[in-house]
Amino acid sequence: MPFSKLGLSQKIELAVAKSGFNTPTPIQEKVIPLILDGQDIMARAQTGSGKSASFVLPILELLSRKLYEGKAKIKVLVLTPTRELTQQIAEAFNTFGAYLEKKPKVVGVIGGEGIGDQLFEIQKGCDILVATSGRFLDILSKKQMNLSHLEFFVLDEADKMLDLGFAEELELILEAIPQKRQNLLFSATYPQKMLSIASRITQSAVEVSIENEEPTVQNITQRAIEVNHENRGPLLRHLLNTNKWELVLVFMSSKRAAENIAQKFKKHGFKAESFHGDLHQEDRNYTIDAFKAKKLNLLFATDLVARGLDIENIDCVINFDLPRSPADYIHRIGRTARAGKSGTAISFVGLEDAEHFNLIEKRSQIKLQREQIEGFELVGEVLKKEKGPEPVKGKGKSKKDKLREKAAQEGK
């Protein structure tokens, strides 16, 4: 189905075509008409499936159909878990709205930049506000932002926002925005906690799931290489020297690990850099831009980069440290093989990782042949984790008890 069949105006279609998109992805095909019809959406689709455009395009279309006079008022609020995704979505609104008669004013707000300047930009007039949830709440607390005209409330990568304490922040946000609005929730996974949050936002969402149709993971050659932990660095150098990969993304378990290994690989002559949440925003932008431009070809990153960040042409993703959850595994490997291309994802599995990787395989419904590379063979016995004692009930205070105690203290 071409974009012309989705009910978008010619000016938005022109922007889409100029951006190099010819046909909508499965999620765009399903979701765009529903949003144009005014429906609340709860959509599930794997990373790299085109989720952002599936709400950016119809929102721009609906805004363009109305005549607005005077200073721009916030009509769209998009919340995301990371700074990079915020910038990416703000850019998408500007790109796809480029040919509209009245271009909407888009403001992106993130941590790591001056809050005063951001608030000033909003107050000058803003149609679309894209924000990380933390920085949005900082601005909200200043009580200098008018949200009474809000029409669209969008959560992108909603499941990841749960990890960042979003459940606790949600009440403050819902109190600040109008009850009558269109709610659009996008996520790769919908754990139970996510469903309970969704029910607080909307009771009438149309559920859209694309996971079985999305070919992203099928285009990825997944490999599991057994190697002792101390040999992972030498093995990685061997793989980089024997394969013609131009861009390689390596996932590490911590900021410090990413920093340390990037320094080591630089000493071995690789164009390497680290990427994590402790970097200043300027450094984060510079690093990602350099990686996209292939000035760097090796990026050691934490899971910060696994969500929503769109970097084309990554040839290989390497799980140097295994992800904590199967959902994170899918997000990580989805950084390669984007936009219909193919790619490789390699996981290093040590003696202490075997059980955990078995669980990832089971939950992700995959089964990979274990490989060993000559000169880096796995030595030793697989370590089995011993179960700890069962938790003793009644020892700790429940959340309700703690809240009751707090209320009683405040009432004194």
Image (cartoon, rainbow, N blue to C red):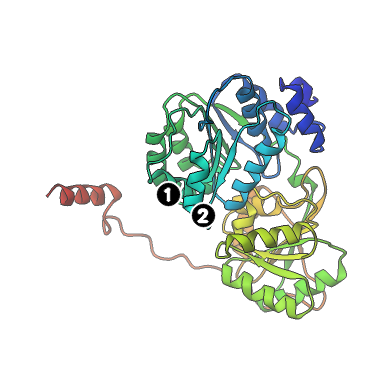
Q: Residue at x 62, y 42 (%)?
A: 90
Give the left or right position of residue 174, taking residue 124 as reference.
left
2 and 1 marks in contact (CB < 8 Å): yes
Q: Residue 43, how many percent across, how many down? A: 60, 33
Give the left or right position of residue 246, taking residue 119 as reference.
right
Q: Quarter of the image for the N terminus: give it.
A: top right
Is residue 334 visible in the rendered structure shown here? yes
Residue at image mark 1: 138
Task: Work out whether 368 lies above or below 182.
Answer: below
Q: Quadrant of residue 40?
A: top right
Looking at numbered disc 2 in the image, what kind of residue is underneath it?
A: Gly
Task: Work out whether 220 lies above or below 257.
Answer: above
Q: Secondary structure at mark 2?
A: loop
Give the left or right position of residue 119, taking residue 13 as reference.
left
Q: Residue at x 27, y 47 (%)?
A: 400
Q: Residue 407, how many percent across, how many down? A: 20, 47
